[in-house]
Image: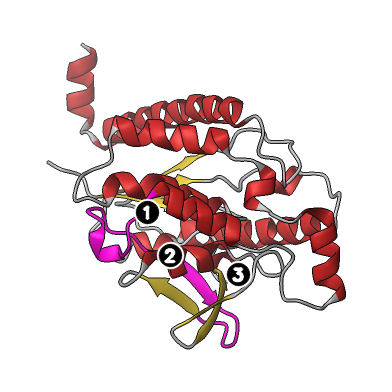
Amino acid sequence: MRLALALVLALLFPATALAHVTVLPESSRKQLPSLRGVERLEATWGALRGEEVFPGGRLSRAWNLLTRDDHLFSNQGLRDIFRRGDTAATFEDLVIPLRVVAADLDTGDEVVFAHGPLQPALLASAALPGIYPPIRHDGRTLVDGAVVDTVPLWHALAGPIDRIYVMNVAGDLMDRPLRSPIDVAVRAFAISRKQRFDLELRNVPESVEVVVFPAPVDDRELFDFSGGRRLMDDAHDLAEQALDEAEQAKRRRRQLRRPFWRRDAEVG
């Protein structure tokens, strides 16, 4: 029997768009992701630098504040990464169904992208308010979907599903030291994410298995993208452990559901 699987990315900051842009090219030509895609993802993340993702430096941030602009950083760096990654042009180009969540800054509505051009959806999903500029698209002013739903489990539950994997990349932000106003904003998002995630987990049907991949310890500054290889190795180890624990828990549940005489016969 084939299982119906879903992957939910629980991310903050531009990690959402960066994760999409480095994975999507491998699934954008009517083919499934491959080992080559994993290697491409590793290479892209390993090569990223803070000044590429957050261009302009401190003087640019100060100028944006003085001129009362609506963001600290241009999203040109993200656009350049999209172009370099040869990302698919539209959702229809993808072989694996994708949903991208954003928030309408004018109405407070949750906006779910599933069709049409990809780049506006990814830029909107990465637009943490005040950090990157809001995206004007289709008559809306859009920002990071974490404003309304940081772990959108209900999208995975909308169709027939057996197992959901949650990549909890934002998991350790609650413990980060507060060094700047941006740290405060990100901590606030992390608190909101945890509250909403706990609520949605309680509403998952018993028939659906949820496996949460924990995040590795990351004590870097928010603008520091160095040490990516170590974090990927740590994340790989944590994911293996989480999958092993999920498999063991499933076996225990299966054992408890068996009639007592069958369990006794197996023991004997």
Q: Quadrant of the N terminus?
A: top left
Tag 2: residue type? Gln
Residue position for label 3: 147
Magenta-highlighted residues? 86-109
Q: Residue at x 17, y 18 (%)?
A: 265
Q: Nearer the viewer, residue 21 or 210?
A: 21
Query: Which of the marked residues, 2 or 3, is nearer the chain's N terminus?
Result: 2
- Does 8 appear above or below 138? above
Work out whether mark 3 precedes mark 1 in sequence or the reverse, and give the earlier one: 1
Q: On screen, 104 above or below 114? A: below
Helix, strand or loop at mark 1 = loop
Q: How is the image coloured?
A: secondary structure
Which quarter shows the C terminus?
top left
Question: Is label 2 in contact with label 3 (beta carbons under 8 Å)?
Answer: no
Residue type, label 1: Thr
Between 119 and 105, the one nearer to me in the picture = 119
Q: Point out the residue furthest to the left here.
A: 1
